[in-house]
Image: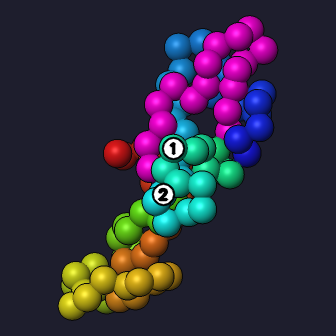
Amino acid sequence: GPREHTVGSPGIAKNVLTVGASQSSRQNDGEDYLAFFSASGPTDDGRTKPDVVAPGYSILSAGAVWSERGECDPPFLPTYGEHEGIAYLAGTSMAAPV
């Protein structure tokens, strides 16, 4: 979580870029804060981590259903959860492509 010294291997290795996830405007603290699941530094030798932070909470993403065709193009967006091949997801994996 966002407590100090929580970045682990391989993120603490030299020359490794780590990506953190910020909260979204939908969360209580707002988008200026690290998401509760995102690790942070500094590392034991004093390097700042994460190196890059991007939105990673309540991200609308493809949630493809392998058995259906065209499911990622619904007639309307979900307000929460998953609907017809798209879903609101969270994680540093959602922050990395940004």
Numbered disc total: 2
Circle 2 — which element? loop
Q: Residue at x 74, y 8 (%)?
A: 45
> On the image, which quarter does residue 16 sit in?
top right
Q: Residue 8: where, in percent of width, then height?
A: 73, 31
Q: Which residue is mark 2?
A: 24
Mark 1 = which residue? 32
Residue type at numbered disc 2: Ser
List x then y, in percent, for residue 80.
Answer: 47, 82
Which region of the structure is painted magenta?
A: 39-56
Q: Looking at the image, which is closer to me, 66 or 64? A: 64
Label 2 crowding class (10 Å Cα cut-off): few <14, some 14-19, many 20+? many
Position of 77 compared to 90: left or right?
A: left
Residue at 67% across, 33% down: 40
Secondary-structure class at tag 1? loop
Distance CA(mark 1)–CA(mark 2): 8 Å
Vertical placement of 4 versus 2: above or below? above
Image quarter of residue 27: bottom right
Would residue 66 be counted in the magenta stretch? no
**50 relative position to 83: left or right:** right
For badge 1, the amino acid type reads: Asp
Is residue 8 at all visible to an observer of this figure? Answer: no
Circle 1 packing at 10 Å, graded few (<14), some (14-19), many (20+), is: few
